[in-house]
Amino acid sequence: MTSSRILTTSKIALAAVLAVGGTQVFAQSATEAELARRLDQLSAELAAVKAQLAQMQQQRATTPEASKPSALAAAEPAPAPVAASEAATVLSSYGEINYNRPNKASQNAQADLRRFVLGYQHRFDAKTKVVTELEVEHSVTSSSDPGEVAVEQAYIEHQVQPNLAVRAGLFLMPAGLLNENHEPPAFFGVERNFVETAIIPSTWREGGIQLVGNFDNGLTVQGGISSSFDLTKWDAAATEGAESPLGSIHQELALAKARDLAVFGAVNWRGMPGLLVGASLFTGGATHGQAAASSRVTLWDAHARWTPGRWDLSAVYARGTISNTAALNATLVGNPTLIPKSFDGWYGQAAYRLWTSGDYALSPFVRVERFNTAKSFADLGPGITPSAAATEQVVTLGANFQVAQGIVVKADVQRFRENSDANRLNLGLGWSF
């Protein structure tokens, strides 16, 4: 078979695969995870076809004329072709550049390459792949610069059955709407919302093992065992714990204390076109036998997203608790930031695709959120127990403008009820591929 015929046959086969895949993509029972798996498979098959074609073209170019088959030989039945390798590597990246200008303190305006991420997925075969991402924050990293380099994901996924996969390594936790889908084109607003940064510490990842099940009724179930938080890291003299209790004690699998482990689970249903409804739960020990009391961190959330027509509507509620904080805080009394007993928050958001032209799309949005990183404290006695923090309310009004698939320009204004000094204008540029 000539290389041109191989290419033609490959194109026909690929078109047939894409046609079938396209029909399945828009089927009511399809899930996002299943679509991602099918796209990975299509990418692997395309790479294999290209590799086979290149190999045969090279062999043809280097074969002496005398050894080329005659017309009679060519008419004879050809031997069965050797199966092409299914290995394929896909590169990915995302990043965002943000500008923040406080209304009451323009001298503190700041521009920042907030994050730049490079990733790759390599498929070893039809069932097994590795997923990795390397993130650089704030542009420059050194002993005298504010930047940080971190591995955001590094895990192996193996498809055990068509609807069941196992992941092992460092992976994003299945919580809320943002944590597993946090690329700039995937969310509205320049900055990530406060509920999914202050309460759910996005981007939150743990090391462990999990099972992922995708079912034909639109249900995705995830669950497993992972590393946990480390309350021995709590710095009562700093403000980081007040900004995000769990963000200040996450370990990110960096020499992580692992005496106490955690269990987690998440359920998401996409059985109706445009609708996602789900919830998650995480609970794990967090003192690792190195504190005065054994303590447990529990975090759960409920979330929903509905995209009827041009609308994009979403809501999240998240609540966290830390047990035995009275014993832990007894040695911290006198410091400004004690460990809270509970913290929570919610937001509601509405966006509307107002105008489109080709790849251009303008989507104004409004988001209202209320959150409290120290909603309650365990009783330490009269005059010692801290008062609960005030619940902050933030209203964000802005728009996302899609320049091309995967490129977005953003602008918004934010108004804070409790801390009005934080009122600001935000501008942003983001990309993802």
Image (tube, helix red, strand yellow):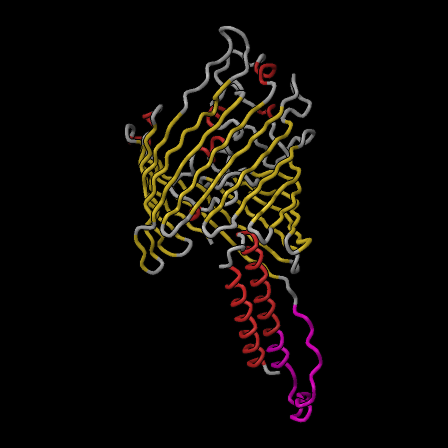
Counting from the top left corner in percent of width and height, residue 189 is at 37, 41
**6 or 396: nearer the eye?**
396
Magenta run includes residue 79:
yes
* Residues rendered magenta in the picture: 55-84
Q: Residue at x 49, y 21 (%)?
A: 238
Counting from the top left corner in percent of width and height, residue 420 is at 32, 25
Counting from the top left corner in percent of width and height, residue 340 is at 52, 20
Q: Quadrant of residue 417?
A: top left
Q: Residue at x 50, y 32 (%)?
A: 318
Q: Is residue 184 left or right of residue 223?
A: left
Residue 348, relative to residue 219: is it above or below?
Answer: above
Residue 186, relative to residue 331: is it above or below?
Answer: below
Counting from the top left corner in percent of width and height, residue 4 is at 55, 81
On-image quarter of the N terminus: bottom right
Magenta run includes residue 86:
no
**93 or 82: nearer the eye?**
82
Query: Which residue occupies the extreme bottom position in the image?
Result: 72
Residue 422, relative to residue 353: is it above or below?
Answer: above
